[in-house]
Image (cartoon, rainbow, N blue to C red):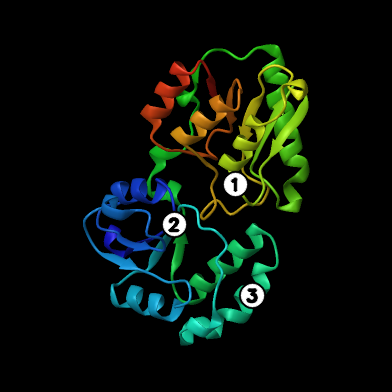
Amino acid sequence: MAENIAILAGHGQLPLDIARACPGAMFINFTESAGSDIPQGRHFRARLERFGELFEVMGQAGISKVIFAGSLSRPQLDPANFDEGSVRLWPRLKAALGRGDDALLREVIAIFETEGFEVVGAAEVAPDLVAAPKMSQGRAMNADEEADAARGLEVLRAISPLDLAQAIVVEGGQVLGLETIQGTDAMLKFVAQTPQLLRRGRGVFVKAAKRGQDMRVDMPTIGPETIRNVAAAGLAGVVIPAGKVLVLEQDEVARLIDQLDLFLVVR
């Protein structure tokens, strides 16, 4: 029953897609970006400095499961604004903030589970969003592009234990861009600015989960904006693993792949 589920919403399209797939869920918004697009139903505007209030509201609403959806920048928290619950949790959060994204997310999951809430993944409630081979679209890859895709996956696997990146751009066997804390779109815009003398044709964008990544709260995601930025960066296409990436607005993604003469390969 969706009535016992809360969507903890950050930026982007994913929280809205999850809400449509899970009518009746409570929509808890940590940002102001969703605006009028927020679906009808139970809403709560949460503040990161007031975890105690959040847990109390969810408990009173009968919430037992939570879904983390959408991006959320590392917050600048002001302890002066903390409620009692946040004061209690601050030592744990402060220690986790000094480590990588995976460590922080694991700590957040542990906090919610300690408070009695089960953390479930977006893929569990909206399985149609998960990348499948049938979503492959566009022209066939050539041998150079296949080699670049393989190289990209190789590098991502190699650096996976360092908790650095989900996405990479490889062109002519060389790494042109590696996702950092600024995110995928920032990386693709950086690649677009690469001087032509360093370019070797049209590279490949690869996105995949890090080894051991908790897919409940940080499943890699692409959507139309990703495809537009791939094209703007002069790349040939996108390669993602089946079952391990969310694809938003899939009809628009497919349209853009064809319109921009790219490929989307899911394997």
Q: Residue at x 57, y 12 (%)?
A: 140
Residue placed under numbered mark 3 in the picture: 94
Q: Residue furthest bottom?
A: 84
State the image coordinates of residue 78 (x, y, percent, origin top left): 54, 78
Callout 3: SS: helix
Quarter of the figure that contains the C terminus: top right
> Do we see residue 87 in this rendering?
yes
State the image coordinates of residue 213 (x, y, percent, origin top left): 62, 52
> Do we see residue 266 in this rendering?
no
Q: Residues within 10 Å of mark 3 (few under 14, many from 20)?
A: few
Residue placed most toward the observer, 164 or 63: 164
The answer to whether the residue labelled 3 contacts the one labelled 1, judged by CB atoms less than 8 Å apart, is no
Determine which quarter of the picture holds residue 104.
bottom right
State the image coordinates of residue 117 (x, y, percent, origin top left): 43, 70
- In this rendering, the answer to whether 252 lies above or below 73 is above
Q: Tell me which label, 3 or 2, sits earlier in the chain.
A: 2
Residue placed most toward the observer, 10 or 207: 10
- In this rendering, the answer to whether 193 lies above or below 83 is above
The kind of residue tagged 2 is Gly
Q: Residues within 10 Å of mark 1 (few under 14, many from 20)?
A: some
The answer to whether the residue labelled 3 contacts the one labelled 2, judged by CB atoms less than 8 Å apart, is no
| Distance between mark 2 and mark 1 Cα atoms | 14 Å
The kind of residue tagged 3 is Lys
Residue placed under numbered mark 2 in the picture: 10
Q: Is residue 255 left or right of residue 217?
A: left
Residue placed under numbered mark 1 in the picture: 183
Q: Tell me which label, 2 or 1, sits earlier in the chain.
A: 2
Callout 1: SS: loop
Quarter of the figure that contains the N terminus: bottom left
Q: Tell me which label, 3 or 1, sits earlier in the chain.
A: 3
| Distance between mark 3 and mark 2 Cα atoms | 20 Å
